[in-house]
Amino acid sequence: MDRWAKWLLETRFGGDEAQLERTLAFLRPVRDRVIANARIGRGDTVLDVGAGDGLIGFAALDLVGDEGRVIFSDISDDLLARCRELAAGRPGAEFVHASADDLSAIPAESVDVVTTRSVLIYVDDKERVFAEFFRVLKPGGRLSIFEPINRWCHEQRPETEFWGFDGSGVPELVEKLMTAYEADAPPPEESPMLDFDERDLVRFARAAGFELFRLEYEAAVVDGAPTGGPASWIAFWSFAGNPNMPTIGEVVEQALTLDEAQRFEAHLRPLVERGEGITRSAVAYLSATKASGEVR
């Protein structure tokens, strides 16, 4: 599998089925909200950008009926193949290999709805993405997106915290691990995951030509493991935060000596397995309408 499929189907939940269900328990309400904001009706043509394994696309397929279409768009051939397999025998499902910032395979003014979830965080040129959304939508078409606002979470994290767990008992090891993460990542101000916030989403929408829009922003700091509850150590060890990251286990093996790794596990493992952490989250839902017929 390519890195996108491997992360989505394996390392985002550490290969643990119980952890996968906790992840999906979080994502289903997100899907439902994106779908509700899109106001999808029977006969609509829906373009789901960054469709992944079809979380939003298949929900949309249920709404458009036999008269409508859902275009599953992704840069991962492996994930498109997964969606094709799941959609076998269902009318109205189409599949396009495309990146969010280049939807040239989709004709201008050809879709009623564009949906997307956690896609902008991987794209450098976000203004181009919004311009592409605007271009493919028909006049009166709707856009509905969800994005985590990672900049806020990044700014809130204490130096001794590791993936939501208290690392103050081994601060020097946490520092080594975070340094290892940062070694292969761009500076925060250049990272597509951190270079925008909810206000930028409004700015991008305005610049693209959207005239009617709604932004819903939510931020929270609550008790509880960021993995959604107690997790096995193996699942935590096998977890990667996104497709561009190594797993936690790989970072530990790279950055720490065997003795350090054992001390790190002795400190963190009980917290992970009891689910004693902090969840920090900031998310934004943006819905917009293409109020004019101008193609930009």
Image (spheres, rainbow, N blue to C red):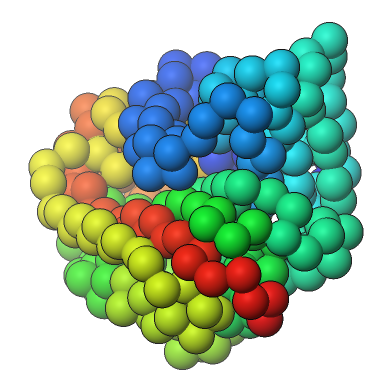
Q: Quadrant of residue 28?
A: top left
Expressed as whole percent of the image width and height from the top left, the position of residue 36 reads: 38, 36
- How many circles with numbers are drawn on the protein? 0
Give whichever of 122, 263 is nearer the camera.
122
Relative to 61, say whether 116 is above or below: below
Expressed as whole percent of the image width and height from the top left, the position of residue 262 reads: 43, 46
Give whichever of 255, 242 is nearer the camera.
242
**Identity of the residue drawn at 75% across and 53% down:** 110
Expressed as whole percent of the image width and height from the top left, the position of residue 202 reads: 37, 75
The answer to whether residue 44 is seen in the rendering is yes
Question: Is 147 on the left-hand or right-hand side of 216?
Answer: right
**Identity of the residue drawn at 30% across and 43% down:** 226
Question: Is 127 on the left-hand or right-hand side of 229?
Answer: right
Q: In what quadrant of the picture does the C terminus appear?
A: bottom right
Q: Quadrant of residue 12?
A: top right
Q: Quadrant of residue 127?
A: bottom right
Question: Is 32 on the left-hand or right-hand side of 217?
Answer: right
Q: In what quadrant of the picture does the N terminus appear?
A: top right
**Identity of the residue drawn at 43% across and 39% down:** 39
Expressed as whole percent of the image width and height from the top left, the position of residue 149 reads: 35, 65
Q: Residue furthest top?
A: 89
**Identity of the residue drawn at 83% across and 26% down:** 84
Relative to 190, say whether 128 is above or below: above
The answer to whether residue 82 is seen in the rendering is no
Relative to 33, say whether 216 is above or below: below
Give whichever of 7, 67 is nearer the camera.
67
